[in-house]
Amino acid sequence: MNPYQNKIYYIYLLFIVAALASCNKSDGSGQGKEIGEILGIKELPQATTDSLYIKSYISKQPEFKQHADLMYLFYGERDYKLAWFRDNELVPEAEKFLATIDNATKEGLDPKKYKLVEFKSLFKQYEDMGRQDSARLELQQQIDVGLTASYFNYASDFYRGRVNPGEVGSIDWNVKKNKIKLHKALQTILQERESTYPYYEFEALHKGYIDLRETLHKYRALQAKGGWEKVDIGKTKMLQKGDTSAAVIQLRKRLNPGQPINVNDPNMRKFDDTLVQQVKEFQRLHGLDQDGKVGGNTLRMMNVPVEDRIQQIMMNMERWRWIPKRLVPKSLDQKYIWVNIPEYKLYIYEDPENDPEAERSYKKVFEMKVIVGKELNSTPIFSDKLEFVVLAPYWNVPNTIVEKEIKPAMLRNPGYLESQDMEIVTKEKDPKPISAYSIDWASVTEKNFPYMVRQRPGPKNSLGDLKFLFPNSYNVYLHDTPADALFNQTERGFSHGCVRLEKPVELAKYLLQDMPEWDEQRIRETIDTGEEEWVTLPKKMQVYLVYFTSWVDEQGKVHFRDDIYGHDKKLAKEFFG
C-alpha cells in the first residue's frame, strides 16, 4: 500500500469512526466498545507520511533542509512508514535522543542548535489526545518527521563534524572522508538493524575522541573553579631548582590546580626535587625540552589560559569526527601507520584480532620520531596506502626545488650538481643523461624545466638508505635521512614536506616481515650495493598523515602541542565563529 492509498484508508477509517461514534459511546448496557472491536481488528496499520509532507516540513527550517536527501532516503526505504512509533506509542529511543541533545555540550556541541522543535510539548499534546482523535494521526506524523530531521541535524555534526573540511578552502585536510551512512545509523538506533558500531547508544566511534571528551569535562570543571594559577617570574629569565621566591608558590599552584597549598610554609617557596619532576612531566606532555626549568617556551605553555585549552580540545575532537569510522578497509590487514605532524611522531597500530567486522581496539606496536615539513613547506594532511619499500633510492628532486634551490646554486657554481652527487636525466622509463652545462639555468622555472634532477644513491643522498612510497598527488613519502642529529631537536620542522624517519630499517623490517627472504641482513646488503631496488608489499598498508594538537595517551595523560602550521587558528574561525 503506497502513502496515498494509506491516507485514503485512514480517511475511510475515520469516516467509520464518526458513523459508529454513538455505538462506541454505549452498547445499551452502559459499556463502551473500542472501534477496533467494532471493526473486528486488533491494531490499526502503522501510520505513514509522504514526500510532500516531508518537503513541506523541512522547508520551514534551514538546518533541516540541508539533510533533505537523507530524509527522503530514510523514509523511502521504509515505504514512508513512521519510525519513532510502535503500536501508536512513542518508542523509548525518542526520549533517549532528546536526552542526548540535551547533553550535547559534553561533545563540544551547542544543544540549542539541535532544539529546533518543542518535542516535550508535542509529546504531552499527543498523550492527551484520545486514541480515536483524527488530529492524532497528523500530530504523530509531525512528531516523527521532526524527530528524524532533528536526528540527522545532530548526527551529521556528531559523526561527520560541524565543519566540512572539503568545503572550507582554508582548512588543509584530505584524509579519506568519514562516509558514515546516517540513515542506517538511525535504523540501528531504532533497533531495526544490527551494527558493530555503537550507534544505538548515540556513542562516538573512536577512542581518541572519547578520551578527549573526558578531558573536556575535567577542564570545564577546572574552569568553573577559576582555572589555574598564572606564573609570573618577573625579570628573571629562568626559574630552576634551588630558587626561593613567591613565583615558586605560583608554580606549585599551576602544576597542582585545585590542591591546597600552604603559602605560609617556607618549604613551599623552594624549587625542590619534587617540583623539578613535575616541571619535567609538564614539559613532556607539551613536547618541550625536559630540563626541569621554567622559562621561555615552558613558561609560555604554562600561562596558556584554561579557556584556550578547552577550545583546543574541542577542535581536536572535531578532527576525530573527520576520521573514517573504519580506520582500515576490510581488504587490508587491520594495521595502520599514523603520523601526527605537530607531535613529530610516527606510530604503528595493530588490531590483535585482525577482524574487520569486530569493534576494533588497536594497539600501538611501534613508534619513532620524525621530521616534518617547514612551515613554508608544510607536510600535507591526507591518507593513502603504502605500497613500496625502495632500498638505496634515487632522490628525484621536485621542480619546485630545482627552481628555488638548484638553479641559484648552479648560477653561483656550475659544479654544484656534481658536488652533491646529482645528475640530470630525461623523463622516460630508461632515463638518458643530460649535461648540466647544456642547460640555460638563468631561464629555468618550475614549469618549463623538461628534465629530471636526481641524486644518486649513497651517503650524500637526501633520502638516506630507504624510502617508503604511497603514491599521491603531493609527491610526499616517508624516508631515511643522513641528518640524524636533527632528531635530537624537540621541534623538528626541517623538511620540504616529506616525512623523515628516525628508524627506517626497523620500519622496513616490520613491513617486510611476511617476506622471509627480506630479513635485516638482506636489507642492509642491498642498501650497500648502491643500486636502487623496489620491493612491492604483499598487501598495501593504510597510512594517515594527520594534525592533532591535543590527544590523550595510553596512561590517560592529555598532551598539547603548538599549532605549527596555523591549522588550529583556521579551524577556530570556522568552528567558533
Image (cartoon, rainbow, N blue to C red):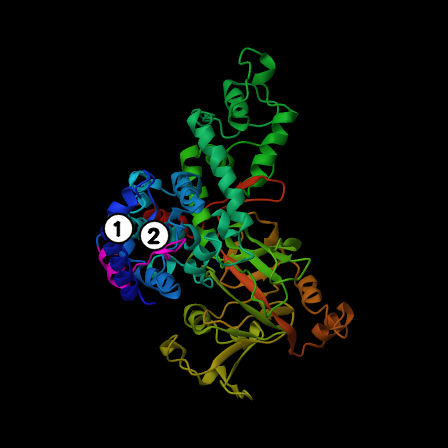
In front of the other: 131 or 458:
131
Give coordinates of residue 508: x percent, y percent. Answer: 68, 67
Q: Is residue 41 magenta?
A: yes
Callout 1 secondary element:
loop
**What span is colored magenta in the figure?**
38-59
User: Is residue 217 at all visible to an observer of this figure?
Assistant: yes
Q: Which residue is mark 2?
A: 38
- Inspect the image, locate mark 1, and give the three-letter code of the amino acid beneath it: Leu
Q: Which residue is mark 1?
A: 20
In front of the other: 260 or 181:
181
Q: CA distance from mark 1 to mark 2?
A: 8 Å
At horizontal 78% and vertical 70% (from top left) the residue drawn is: 521
Horizontal side of residue 460 vs 204, given as left or right:
right
Callout 2 secondary element:
helix
- Inspect the image, locate mark 2, and give the three-letter code of the amino acid beneath it: Ile
Horizontal side of residue 265 vs 39, given as left or right:
right
- Mark 1 and mark 2 lie on one chain; the one further toward the N terminus is 1
Q: Is residue 396 above or below residue 289?
A: below
